[in-house]
Image: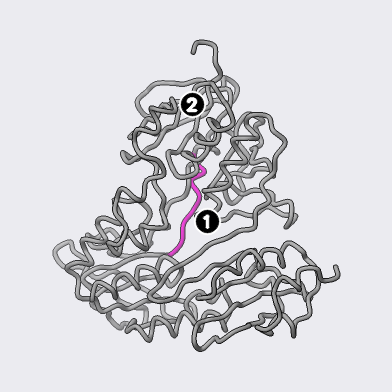
Amino acid sequence: MAGDPTYLIAGASLAGAKTAQTLREEGFQGRIVLIGQESEPPYERPPLSKGYLLGTTSRGEIYVHPQPWYGEHQVDLRLGTAVTGIDPARHEVSLSDGSRIGYAKLLLATGSSPRRLQLPGADLDGVHYLRRVGDSDRLKAALQSASRVAIIGAGWIGLETAAAARAAGAEVTVLESAPLPLLRVLGRQAAEVFAGLHREHGVYLACGVQVAEILGRGGQAVGVRLADGSRIDADAVIAGIGITPNVELALAGGLEVDNGVRVDEHLRTSDADIYAAGDVANAFHPLLGRHIRVEHWANALYQPQVAARAMLGQDVAYDRLPYFFTDQYDLGMEYSGYVEPDGYDQVIFRGDVEARQFIAFWLRGGRVLAGMNVNIWDVNDAIQDLVRAGGRVDTSALGDAETPLGSLAGAAP
């Protein structure tokens, strides 16, 4: 209706769609414009390296809402269009089609982009990155015909695509500069679990190596040359070397940027009428007492609910603990909490590590900072309670599977 405020969302992602949904659930009657550069309606990204890539999740299942939802809830969804600029003084954005739209409140859900290989041959056909549904489609097609796959990077994306490639019957080599996969994220003991898992499933892990070149023939990638001169033949090369937040729009708009768009606990940027959520947001976390940027699904799912309510003037703060999960072969894992690679002084395991049925805890000064449950379920809430409690725990009881986790959360500060 004429005169109603316009709330504009830049990024038709999970975070963008959930912001629009929450605005309507909270009773917002104004205009909502959701703008996305991709031609696809908002979808969830975890299936792209898991079920959708494996073929066990259908395309229809990845979408955040059925297509009719947007019209039914009067959300102006504009696909194939990018927000190219912000004018905070005028409260306007410019679009790639040359038009401009005014806003009362603006949310940035611009996400992140894969880091690109800076190597000779990196632009050859057959070099794959995984971020968008189209990337997953192309990789799925490649895995159907590839007999040998080389994966550069042994992070979560690298290992999940390795599992998918093995499921497709390909020989898989994972190339990693660190001594173990996930070493920086999990530490040596937990990283060994994932290394053993992949080796048992026939993956060749080449750790402590440097990739020098993507080899090609006729414009097509045919392998990888390492710094020591050795060669890995491959019909497809997958790069999973991390992502970077898409901050260009925020920078152009004069917003504060520091490893993402810097926001407070309300998800508000340095401009009072502009908010950010998801991968792009470096948010102050009240519980942790610092800014963190989390590149996982749960943030894109839950941060928008707080951002939308804050945009409506509600006094809310985002204080959920970081959470992520993975599924690889017969291993399922959940991780809650936050710890820097050098931010802990002890790791305690409870359960059977060799059988891959255990919980790992990262501690500093006797306080639990994070926990990871592997093939043990219905314990994540208790792990989060331990992290939130912030008190010193009895470490011997923490490692004893017979001691209920719930009994440890009330430890002394």
| Residue 26 locus on image (x, y percent) | 59, 31
Residue 225's place in the image compared with 33, above or below, is below
Q: Nearer the viewer, mark 1 or mark 2?
A: 2
The residue shown at (41%, 26%) is 76
Specify the quadrant of the image occupied by residue 105: top right
Q: How many numbered callouts? A: 2
Q: Amino acid at mark 1?
A: Glu
Residue 225's place in the image compared with 326, above or below, is below
Of labels 1 and 2, earlier in sequence is: 2
Tell me how far mark 1 sits from mark 2, CA to CA.
26 Å
Q: Residue furthest left?
A: 218
| Residue 176 locus on image (x, y percent) | 43, 76
Near-viewer residue (72 or 339)? 72
| Residue 22 locus on image (x, y percent) | 55, 36
Q: Residue furthest bottom?
A: 354
The residue shown at (38%, 54%) is 131
Q: Which residue has dot 1 on it?
A: 295
Near-viewer residue (377 or 388)? 377
Specify the quadrant of the image occupied by residue 353: bottom right
Q: Assess whether residue 328 is covered by the magenta stretch.
A: no
Q: Residues within 10 Å of mark 2 (few under 14, many from 20)?
A: many
Q: Residues within 10 Å of mark 1 (few under 14, many from 20)?
A: many
Near-viewer residue (242 or 264)? 264
Q: Which residue has dot 2 on it?
A: 32
- Disc 1 secondary structure class: loop
User: Magenta segment, which residues?
Assistant: 241-248
Q: Assess whether residue 242 is covered by the magenta stretch.
A: yes
